[in-house]
Image (cartoon, rainbow, N blue to C red):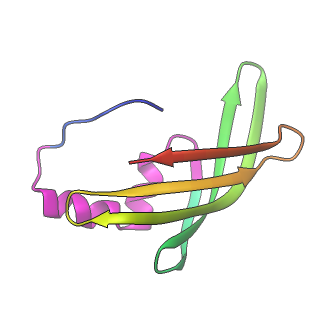
Amino acid sequence: MNESQRISASKQRVWDALNNPDVLRRCIPGCQSLEMSASNEMTATVVIKVGPVKATFGGKLTLSDFDPPSSYLISGGGNGGLPGLRKAVWR
């Protein structure tokens, strides 16, 4: 995912929204569920389709490098069974 979006809201309002797991879930393509498991960790289920192959990955996301209200780093990985392991990082 290499994409950016312009949001016409204050940095603080966007920061608050992206720290809400339900809002963040809707921002991650294919994310079916996202739940806080610790103050900086979430568990997720993501469905990814590449060509004819569709896989469901379960994994953990870690939030780090906090610079409120400007940014933080989301990194994580998951296991999709036969399609294998995947890792991702978003800023």
Residue depicted at 75% across the width and 32% down the height:
54
Number of marks drawn: 0
Q: In terms of depth relative to the viewer, which is nearer, 61 or 55? A: 61
Q: Is residue 30 magenta?
A: yes
**Is 32 situated left or right of 26 in this image?**
right
Res. 23 image quadrant: bottom left
- Residue 5, percent from left and from top: 26, 35
In the rendered structure, which segment of residues is drawn in magenta?
8-32
**Is 45 situated left or right of 69 in this image?**
right
**Is 12 situated left or right of 36 in this image?**
left
Res. 71 image quadrant: bottom left
Residue depicted at 74% across the width and 46% down the height:
56
Q: Is residue 11 magenta?
A: yes
Which secondary structure is most common in the magenta stretch?
helix
In the current view of this chain or complex, which residue is farthest to the top? 51
- Residue 36, percent from left and from top: 52, 74
- Residue 74, percent from left and from top: 46, 56
Q: In terms of depth relative to the viewer, which is nearer, 69 or 51? A: 69
Residue depicted at 66% across the width and 53% down the height:
77
Residue depicted at 53% across the width and 55% down the height:
75
Task: Determine whether 5 is above or below 18 in the image.
Answer: above
Task: Determine whether 41 is above or below 28 in the image.
Answer: below
In the current view of this chain or complex, which residue is farthest to the front? 65
In the current view of this chain or complex, which residue is farthest to the bottom? 38
**Is 6 situated left or right of 24 in this image?**
left
- Residue 12, percent from left and from top: 15, 64
Task: Determine whether 78 is above or below 1 in the image.
Answer: below
